[in-house]
Image (cartoon, rainbow, N blue to C red):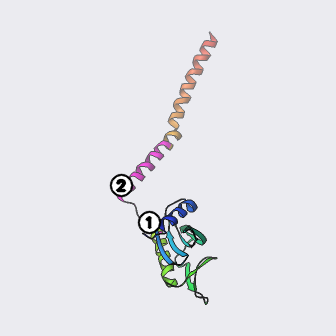
Amino acid sequence: MHPHNMAIEVWCEETWGERPVRISDWANHDDIVQVLIRLSSSVLIADFLLDSDGKLNIQQHLHIPLETWNPGSIQGLRTSEGKTRFQHRRQSIYLSSELRVPEWGAALLEEWLLSMRSAVNRPKDRTQRINEIKRLKLSIERNLESASLTKVADEATSLDGQLDRINNRLAN
């Protein structure tokens, strides 16, 4: 386990309300910690700065939710200044270019998001399908029962009987 993973997990819980599924190092040197983070339904690119007390402080991050992602929409490019720019739609983040090539990071993020999307669309097993059908059947039965005209007809007959008895009492 990376020495900063615990601090990154705490930051994710405080900021995003969940623990990361996976943390992958992008760069870790001097006072810079840059990571790619997989959450349950999104990915993050985060740039942390290590202060003199050894505490991580977030400098910048790029959040890519599964709902806004399309395959191929994450771009990783090396800039003329020697940095790596990751871009998704109109948002971008600049990271160090010392250890990895931009294509590796973009491919990893795309792979994570693709696996999330396939998990959402994955066919259910037989038991899950049967239980879903049973729940649907029960719901339909309840709706039909509440919409049934036989209950209404029985109620109308009962009310007619009560009216007849009341009329007979009043007539006497």
Is residue 120 positioned above or below 104 on the image? above
Which of marks 2 and 1 precedes in the sequence? 1
Span highlighted in magenta in the image = 117-142
Can you see residue 139?
yes
Picture residue at 56% right of the left edge, 29% below the top: 156
Image mark for residue 119: 1
Percent position of residue 39, x then y:
50, 66
Badge 1 marks a residue whose secondary structure is: helix
Q: Position of residue 167 (x, y in %)?
A: 62, 17
Q: Nearer the viewer, mark 1 or mark 2?
A: 1
Q: Is residue 48 left or right of residue 115?
A: right
Quadrant of the drawing holding the C terminus? top right
Mark 2 lies on residue: 127
Q: Is residue 118 magenta?
A: yes
Front one among 77 and 33: 33
Q: Residues within 10 Å of mark 2 (few under 14, many from 20)?
A: few
| Residue kind at label 1, given as amino acid type | Ala
